Image (cartoon, grey):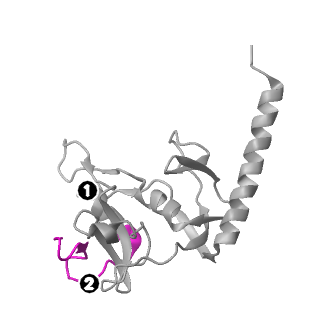
Amino acid sequence: MSKEQPYAVAADGTPFKSQQAASLVIHSKGLPPDKFVVVKYQGGWAILDLDGFAASKATEAQPGSTVSPSSGAAPAERYFEVKFMHRQMGTNEPPYVPLTLDGRELRIQRMTPVVLSESFLQIADHAVMKTWVPSKEPNKPMEEGEPVQRYPYEKIREATKEEFNKCLAAGNAIQQSVLERLRRAGPKA
């Protein structure tokens, strides 16, 4: 990546086939996620170096948005109905999926379809965990394997911003009712 070409693509010079593949490159190379984001690029995915991107255009490029190499303009954010998979057994992960973006945390119930913006899905894509595999040599410690998604999900369909706002309002109402019940119950002795 350079100031003239702030996009990184696969080693063969073509865009990454999936958003997750590009995200894994960011993670495996230890690139700071606030400086490098995954964007749609020429029918696939690329890694955008925000420092290398012109300052006026960098503010327009949001994670997960489509960027045209000629214009640099980013279209409106996309929304998807998704379903997060069950948590892995033997881990101390919460029963919900916590996604925090710009100080706003969403707690997503697993195995329940929900509408999210691409920005929140980017958070889930970047949440990876290490795996360990047995060494090929006897009496050697485990070796680090490929990282896997901490919060895997299935995209069901593309959705609208209105559906996202409706889903968000319903979730906020549930959360408010839980908090109200806790306030009424008072502190535990």
Query: In the image, is residue 47 above or below residue 66?
Result: above
Whether residue 59 can be seen here = yes
Residue at far front of view: 56
- Quadrant of residue 142 in the image? top left
Which label was assigned to residue 151? none
Q: Position of residue 13 (x, y in %)?
A: 21, 82
Looking at the magenta stretch, what is its main secondary structure? loop
Q: What amino acid is labelled 1 in the image?
A: Leu
Which label was assigned to residue 31? 1
Q: Position of residue 123 (x, y in %)?
A: 46, 57
Query: In the image, is residue 42 above or below residue 45?
Result: below
Frontmost of labels 2 and 1 is 1
Q: How many marks?
A: 2
Tag 2 residue = 14
In the image, the segment drawn in magenta is: 1-21
Callout 1: SS:
loop
Residue closest to the eye, 63 or 52: 52
Callout 2: SS:
loop
Magenta region includes residue 171: no
Which residue appears at 72% of the width and 50% of the height? 172
Residue closest to the eye, 9 or 56: 56
Which residue appears at 28% of the width and 50% of the height? 134
Q: Position of residue 188 (x, y in %)?
A: 74, 18
Magenta region includes residue 5: yes
Query: In the image, is residue 100 above or below residue 120?
Result: above
- Quadrant of residue 41 in the image? bottom left
Question: Quick one: quadrant of the C terminus?
Answer: top right
Q: Residues within 10 Å of mark 1 (few under 14, many from 20)?
A: few
162 sits to left or right of 158: right
- Quadrant of residue 22 in the image? bottom left
103 sits to left or right of 31: right
Residue at far top of view: 189
